Image (tube, rainbow, N blue to C red):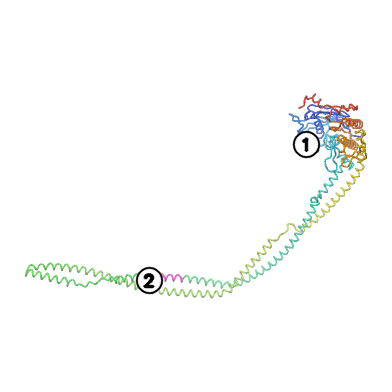
Amino acid sequence: MAGWITVKITKLEIGDFGRFHQYTLELSEGMNIIYGENEDGKTTLMSFLRLMFYSNQKSTRDLTNLRKKYLPWGKETMNGAIELEAEGKQYRVQKSFGSTAAKDDMDIYCISTGEKILLPKDMEAGEWFFHLDGDAFERSLFIGQPGPILSYDGKKKDDIAGRLENMESSGDESVSAEDVMKRIQDAKEAMVSKRQSNGILVKSKAKEAELLQKIAKIKELESLQRQQYEEIRDLSKDRDECKKNKLRLSLEMEKEKQSVDQIMEAQNTLEECKRRTELQKAQVDSEIKLQQMRMATEEDKLSFLLKNEPKAIQHNFVVRYGIPALFTAAVSAAGAFLVHPVFLFGMIVTVLMILLFFSGKKAEKAGKRNWEEWMESKEACRLRIQEQKEAGNGIEKQILLLKSFEEIQKEAEDDLIQRQKEYSAFAGLRDEYNACMEEISDIEQQIFALQASLKRPETGIEELAGELSILREKIEEQQLYYDALSFAGDIMQEAADELRHSFSPKLNKMTADIFTKLTNGKYQYLLVSKAYDISVLPEGVQYREGDYFSKGTTDQMYFALRLAMLLLLEEKEGLQLPVFLDDSFASYDTKRCRETLRYIKEYLTNDRKQIILFTCHESMADLSEEIDFKITKKNLHIDKQKVFGKMC
């Protein structure tokens, strides 16, 4: 069709990818049926196609895992090529796959001109050929097994439903009214959440309330501060008065300081007198005790001497013994000479008497010496006693001196008492001064406590007021923005509804026409709801929902809907692209498969140019031959046996 973008794939060449090694698959215009049993590689081929055209396919979260999954055993890389025809020219895309998209090595050549195609940065090969991103490619050109299509409830839509909704709601498949309304709703919820507990506007208003609360607290704090400052001012006045009184008392006490000095001097004098008196008294007591001890000792000695006085020797040994001895000697000598010799015995008496004389003289001398010594001792004791008595006079002087000290001490005590009486006025001043000092200390403690309790705000009320003013302007702008979003959402919903009203009949008609042909005219009336639920009017007067019918019929309904969507999209965008059907007829019986192939032959092949059907039902080719439908058949199982032998 003139002016349309026409693309068809002519050849797949796989060097290494999954279970395929040095494998080539040629495709033609029209219907291509790729048959293979389970695990023969149909899914591998489809993954190869996707990765060749879209390395960074956003909708496929596990492309890295696909790279790992299809990395052949014992190999470190995968590679392949695709040849295709686009807008009348032949192209070749060849790629060596890395562990990530960034490590892929891809080249595109225009075989018709021989030039190498350089794509803009970050552009995929599929975007350049199909004018579709990876998401749109998978959702439009890949049609899987039919089934319900999710719509405006925000859940994921199957295949091309999203693109059709964009056309239906916004008039442009690239612009999703639902997405726009969702973005508007998201923007509104970013401003005010559904529960109105979060959001930019909510936070701003919460911040406004917080600022107002802070300002109120600061005002309350300032009021409390004023009261505290007044209390501090009053206390400071009281403290100043006390300090003045303290100064007055200090001056008066300075005047009375001489009295204090005199009292101190009198106290010192009294202390000195007491000390001297005590020392004198101790000395007197000591000397009296010593004298008494000495007197007692001497008196005891004198008494002992008097008691042991020696007796005086009064014998006259010359008269008693000397003269009689001489007389006796004379008589004895005369008697012996004159009378008889017997008188010589008288000489013996004379000798004895002479011996007694000399013995008595010696004793007399010794006794005299004892007497003289006794007398000397007695006199010495008397002299010492006399000396002690005379020494008593000195003690009396000490006693008189002690009495003098005591009199002086008494005078000092009297003087101190008199001065203390005079000091009573100073003591009153001192007590008043001390009371004044205590009052000053108490006032200062109160002032300190008040100053410590003062709470100064971290931010001034003027700064908060300025911040509040700016915030209120911001809130006003945010409120206007929120109101504008609400208004835009309402207008967008109304516009989408109007577009849907004009678009839905066209979709209903095209879906019903296709479904009628697929069922060979059995069902002619069909309705597609906003949510893409299908209701059919069988024989009778009531529409029935799709669940009312058999699974095969239901699958035909949704296949008709998908084809209608695809046709409308291609008409809108001017596209003629290959369509990939992945076992889309798996639940069909033979009759339904035949009618479906007949419809594809009559209504799609001429316009679409190329359809690629992957199936595990080999009978699809036989049915195509029954209706004389020219197809290209590829049996993966046979080809693989021929190329590789039995697959592991």
* Of residues 118 and 24, the one drawn nearer to the viewer in this rendering: 24
Quadrant in which residue 16 is drawn = top right
Q: How many marks?
A: 2
Q: Is residue 580 visible?
A: no
Quadrant in which residue 357 is drawn = bottom left
Mark carried by residue 292: 2
Residue 626's place in the image compared with 569, above or below, is above
Crowding at mark 2 (Cα within 10 Å: few <14, some 14-19, many 20+): some
Could you tell whether 540 is left or right of 636 in the image? right
Q: Could you say whether the residue bearing mark 1 is in a helix, strand or loop?
A: loop
Q: Main secondary structure of the magenta part?
A: helix
Residue 261's place in the image compared with 486, above or below, is below
- In this picture, which residue range is highlighted in magenta? 276-294
Is 21 a magenta residue?
no
Residue 636 screen position, x and y as percent: 82, 27
Amino acid under label 1? Asp
Crowding at mark 1 (Cα within 10 Å: few <14, some 14-19, many 20+): few
Amino acid under label 2? Gln
Q: Residue at x 67, y 62 (%)?
A: 449
Q: Residue at x 55, y 75 (%)?
A: 421
Quick one: label 1 or label 2, which is nearer the N terminus?
1
Residue 335 screen position, x and y as percent: 8, 70
Residue 417 screen position, x and y as percent: 53, 74
Q: Could you say whether the residue bearing mark 2 is in a helix, strand or loop?
A: helix
Q: Label 1, on which residue?
A: 62
